[in-house]
Image: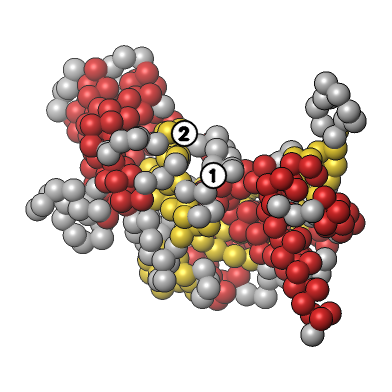
Amino acid sequence: MKRRTNGLKRESSASLVLDTIRRYRPINRYEIAKRTSLSPATVTNVTNLLLNAGLICESPGSIPERGRRPTNLSLSDDNYLAVGMEIDTQHITGVVMGLGGKVLREKRININKHAPEFVFKEVINLFNLLTEGFNKEGIVGLGIGIPGLISPTDKEVIFSAILDWRDVSVEEFIGDFDTPYFIEDNVRAITLGELWYGGGRGRDNLLCVGAGRGISAGIVINGSVYAGPDDRAGELGHMVIEKDGKKCKCGNYGCLEPYVSTETIIRKALEGVENNAYTEFSPSEDNRLFDEIVSAGKSGDKFILNIFEEVGEYLGIGIANIINLFNPQLIILADELMKAEDLILEPVRRMIRLYALPPVPEIVVSSLGTLACPVGSAALAIEKFLYEKILEV
């Protein structure tokens, strides 16, 4: 019993030290001891084990005014790698990434069909392209971010309006895949990426709002991404903001999503052109419509600016509601709508100041940009790998 107790204690210490390095890297051993309340000897023993396991690496710290130069510790990008992907309506984007978040390779492939058998065949093709030349034994897993209602445990897409999928078993299409793989709702994947490698690092409570073709929120409570008992948490786009309002893809009326999505902006801009609105926006490429609209807005087109103003106000009201509900430290805005930058951010921030109870949390745009979902998806595999590896240390 004593040997098992010692094993549990070491496992707990190793997990605590590794999590502290992940959250606050680069960090030296003295700072780890202060943050964890572990003894310096325990921190030294544990970090030596983690170094020998190839999970962390050392680098020189800053030169102090007095005393020895400390050695900083970070998660290692050299020994183990993960692959992360995002499935969208037009592309599958993938990355190969180290444990510390360094993207070593990225690639995007176009897709013109949404049938699950086609999409997952392309997922496997992209995985092979991404991992070519890397040591396959060092690939710890594949994470896939998919828009919609996802059951990560059953590896099933319950419903995706964007992809027009319902009750899709990923296992059925991937089959006997040699590498461990995981699936997650794309915004929860983005949220994990921001928490581990982006603007949310070191924060315990935050909201990550993904605004693109759909609207969703990733919720972090006490340092963990909250999914709810049925993996349904965070469906911000289906918050009802207008009684008897516009019909949503979900079948209800008055949901936030029909007022805020990139599809809404594109539809309003095209309707304006068709009705001879005073605008310089002239659509040319179907697959770049949103980018062209953003460009027109940044050039000062008042018709386009009014569209972003209206959409931003609705989004700001929705976010203000969840701020009042969760009292987060930080709001991170992500996904395609953020290409508009201040065109959308200014009305969002104005509505939040108007409707959220003070103090209003900091509001930032994703620091991971267009790779937020692939990076977060890779983090799914890394999180599982690190948990299992700790048991061996």
On the picture, is 224 further left or further right than 233? right
- Percent across and percent down for residue 125 are 66, 57
The residue shown at (67%, 42%) is 24
The residue pinned by badge 2 equals: 365
- Percent across and percent down for residue 66 are 86, 24
> Visible in this render: residue 162?
yes
**Amino acid type, mark 2:** Val
On the picture, is 272 further left or further right than 294? left
Outermost residue to the bottom: 1
Q: Contact, CB < 8 Å: mark 2 with mark 1?
A: no
The secondary structure type at the circle numbered 2 is: strand
**The C terminus appears in which quarter of the rendering?**
bottom right
Q: Quadrant of residue 159?
A: bottom left
In the rendered image of this protein, does residue 371 appear above or below residue 16?
A: above
The secondary structure type at the circle numbered 1 is: loop
In the rendered image of this protein, does residue 391 appear above or below residue 52?
A: below
